[in-house]
Image (tube, grey):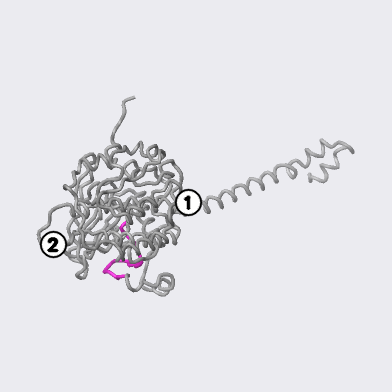
Amino acid sequence: MSSNSSADACEPGETLCVIRVHEQEVFIIPSLLFISFLAILLAILLLRFCPERRRARTTAPRWVQNQNLQNQDQNPGYQRSAHRLHGVDAPGEFNILEHEVVPMTIKHPSRNLRPTPPPPAEWQRGAFSQVSALTRTLAIEPDAQALYRAQLDGQGVVLRVLTEAASSAERRDFLGFTSFLWALGSHPFLPALLGVVSMTTPLTMVVEELEQRDLLGFLWRCRQHHPAGQALCELTEKRIFLMAEQVASALEYLHGRGCIHGNVAARSVLIGGDLTAKLWGLGPAYRRGRRPLSPETRKWHAPEVLAGRAVNHSSDVWSLGVLLYEMVTLGEPPFPQVQASALLQHLQRGRSLKRPHTCSNALYSIIRSCGQWSVGQRPPVAQLIRRLRSGVKTADGRTVLRAPEPMDIEKYLREAGYGEAYNYAVL
């Protein structure tokens, strides 16, 4: 019997009878259509916002030689720094040495670092030669990456390798970080990437080697006695102004690219054989907001960062002032008599970095201006660069800075706040 004939069976005015007859058309079919709409909408949302798809979009691209035209348009220095290796994709214009831990001259007594695995045998038979391990020291956070020194076409390079022990999350982080660096482009005072092995395992970044390695270790070596004629570590205030200007120039470039460094310190600067300074340590910039502030770096951070607010351009200026203090003291920790956990309260009382006895009025005035409590009272980076350039012209270039004694490593770790990260209270 059709629905029309069924409806005719209902007496006039019997609304309930008519609804029962047309129940399927009135309720069931629209309900099924609505459910189907929700299912399609959910599928679209999953495809649009699925984390795996989002990760895929941020994964490092597979660079090939035919990308030169696009890369040259976006990065004029592409041809200058890109280097095609055998089996290596070379994106050029990379600053590579990033969220790498610092290869210095000491080992942190409280950390059990992962041993560096031997280099792959095929490296010695391929493009790389004289491969040797670089011991990772004073590591703030150990990870599944290993460092090697090698030669490539007669040039010293550093190989940063993701080991077989790396998890899938660490692999994604490694590739994501290369994409981050690629987007930043190149600068004369940022370490240059020479290639990335991404087609085969292990994933490897190939970076220019800076002979003097990190600035903090270099400053500590300047404290030691050197034979006559060995002037490499003879640091003058004029040289400090020049190196600080180079770091500030790199910082200005990063700010122009929408990147806040957040990790300016002597441990995050690399020194070349000609004492050129290049800023590195970009891990915190890549992981901005995803990890809490480390107790081991508190003494280099501005008050607003210590108070839990976001890092800004002026926060990098504060840290640059602390870097100047490290340089003029040949590697002493800032605020040595203040616990890292009490530093914010110390600064709230109007205290600042004390003037080192080897520091001129001109240099200390810059340190003080960078260390202003108010964000608005600190100089912008461009103004800071002008003051540093002026200092290069007028500073003493003859008097070599000296320290009364070599660095006491245990004392440094304690005064810099590294030890506080491992103190536990019994509740």
Where residue 398 appears, as percent x and y from the top left, is 21, 62
Q: Toward the viewer: 234 or 186? A: 234
Residue 226 falls in image quadrant: bottom left
Residue 32 visible in the shown view: yes
- In magenta stretch: residue 94: yes
Please state if 243 lies on the left or on the right of 20 as rendered: left
In the shown orientation, is residue 400 left or right of residue 277?
Answer: left
Q: Position of residue 235 (x, y in %)?
A: 22, 58
Query: Does residue 232 lie above or below 340 as drawn?
Result: below
Three-letter code, disc 2: Gln
Q: Are marks 2 and 1 in contact (CB under 8 Å)?
A: no
Quadrant that contains the C terminus: top left
Please tell me how crowded label 1 is: few (under 14), some (14-19), or many (20+) other residues with Cα within 10 Å. Answer: few
Residue 31 spot, x, y in % from top left: 68, 43
Q: Amino acid at mark 1?
A: Gly
Q: Nearer the viewer, residue 48 or 239?
A: 239
Judging by the rendered image, the residue that carries numbered circle 1 is 376
Q: Which residue is rendered at x = 20% and y = 51% of the image?
A: 220
* Along the viewing direction, whichever of 48 and 108 lies nearer the viewer: 108
Secondary structure mostly seen in magenta is: loop
Residue that extends furthest to the left in the rendered view of this protein: 227
- The answer to whether residue 219 is left or right of residue 253 is left
User: Residue at (39%, 42%) from the top-left corner?
Assistant: 292
48 in magenta: no
Left or right of residue 223, residue 67 in this image: right
Point out the stretch of residues depicted in magenta: 82-97
- Name which of mark 2 and mark 1 comes first in the sequence: 2
Dot label at residue 178: none
Q: Nearer the viewer, residue 281 or 196?
A: 281
Q: Which residue is mark 2?
A: 230
